[in-house]
Image (spheres, rainbow, N blue to C red):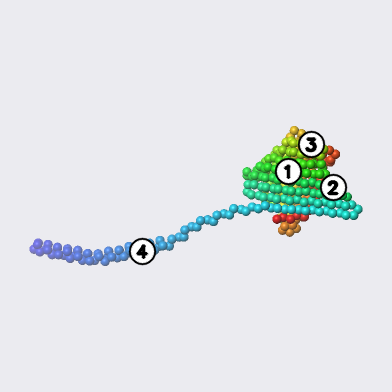
Amino acid sequence: MNIRAMTCSSAAGILAASLLQVTAQPAMVTVTNYLTVTVTNVVTITNFALPAPTAPALALAPKHSWENAVSVGLTVARGNSDNLLFTADYVAQYKTQYDEYKLSLGGAYGDQDSKDTVNFYKVFGQWNHLFSERFFSYVRTDGLKDVIADVDYRLTIGPGVGYYLLKATNTTLAVEAGDAFEAQKLDGEGDQTFDTVRFAERFEHKFNGHVRIWENVEILSQVDKFDNYIVNSEVGLETMLSKSFTLKTFLDDSYDHRPAPSKLKNDIRLVTALGYKF
């Protein structure tokens, strides 16, 4: 009885295990299909990769160019008196973030009744190197020949420092101080050389890009003889007639405390000239 019961139980167990195996097999297939679909979808998603970032475009360096201007003035009178006055000048400027260059050439010639009344030529150049937005050093040279004032030649060259008290888009105000070597020859005197100290101030303002005013003062004094000094000053107004043409009027004053023998200390010139910028 017990053996028979055990036999039946074993048979029932084997049958149950077989049924369980058959039943479980479809579940394993379902799981396998789920995993396959999942992996396939992940691979498909990775195909939608974001585009690689492009390298930023290099910033173009700012371009700088020379600013040039020439101006000419002419006055002619005929009749009871014969007068002629001719003036001309050329100014060039170049500015970068750290350097400023300026070059100027000028002269004037005039006669009255076939006698020279004005006859001078001058040149100057200056290089400023900026250490900050306002503070700079400079090297400057000036040359002058004035026949009427009996200045055969006058040459100054030297370094200095400067500072912009105002530096805006339309307004600048700068002060300068430095040392210079001066060489000159006055008519009736021999060659002279000496050291000088230089103090200068220059101001400029532009109104709406059409009108410009400027003013500058320069004092040069011999180091060991302060009574031997020169004061140069100028004030002017410039109006734009078109994009390139201008009309400017300026007053130029040169005071020499120790002029050539029999010459006046002060020379003043009022000039009106037509200018062209390029």
Q: CA distance from mark 3 to mark 1?
A: 20 Å
- Name the image quarter holding residue 77: bottom right
The mark that comes first in sequence, 2 or 4, is 4
**Picture layout, residue 244 above or below residue 190:** below
Q: Amino acid at mark 2?
A: Asp
Q: Which residue is mark 4?
A: 40
From the viewer's side, name the closer residue of 107 and 152.
Answer: 152
At which x and y percent is residue 208? Answer: 71, 55
Label 4 residue SS? helix
Q: Amino acid at mark 1?
A: Asp
Looking at the image, do the residues carrying marks 3 and 2 touch, with CB atoms under 8 Å apart? no
Q: CA distance from mark 3 to mark 2?
A: 24 Å
Label 3 residue SS? loop
Residue at the spot 29% in from the left edge and 65% down from the top edge: 30
Q: Mark 1 packing: few (<14 Cα in 10 Å), some, or many (20+)?
A: some
Q: Which residue is mark 3?
A: 190
Number of numbered discs visible in the structure rendering: 4
Q: CA distance from mark 2 to mark 4?
A: 103 Å
Q: Which residue is mark 2?
A: 116
Looking at the image, do the residues carrying marks 1 and 2 touch, with CB atoms under 8 Å apart? no
Residue at the spot 64% in from the left edge and 45% down from the top edge: 130
Looking at the image, do the residues carrying marks 2 and 4 touch, with CB atoms under 8 Å apart? no
Looking at the image, do the residues carrying marks 3 and 4 touch, with CB atoms under 8 Å apart? no
Q: CA distance from mark 1 to mark 2?
A: 24 Å
Q: Which residue is mark 1?
A: 142
The mark that comes first in sequence, 1 or 4, is 4
The mark that comes first in sequence, 3 or 4, is 4
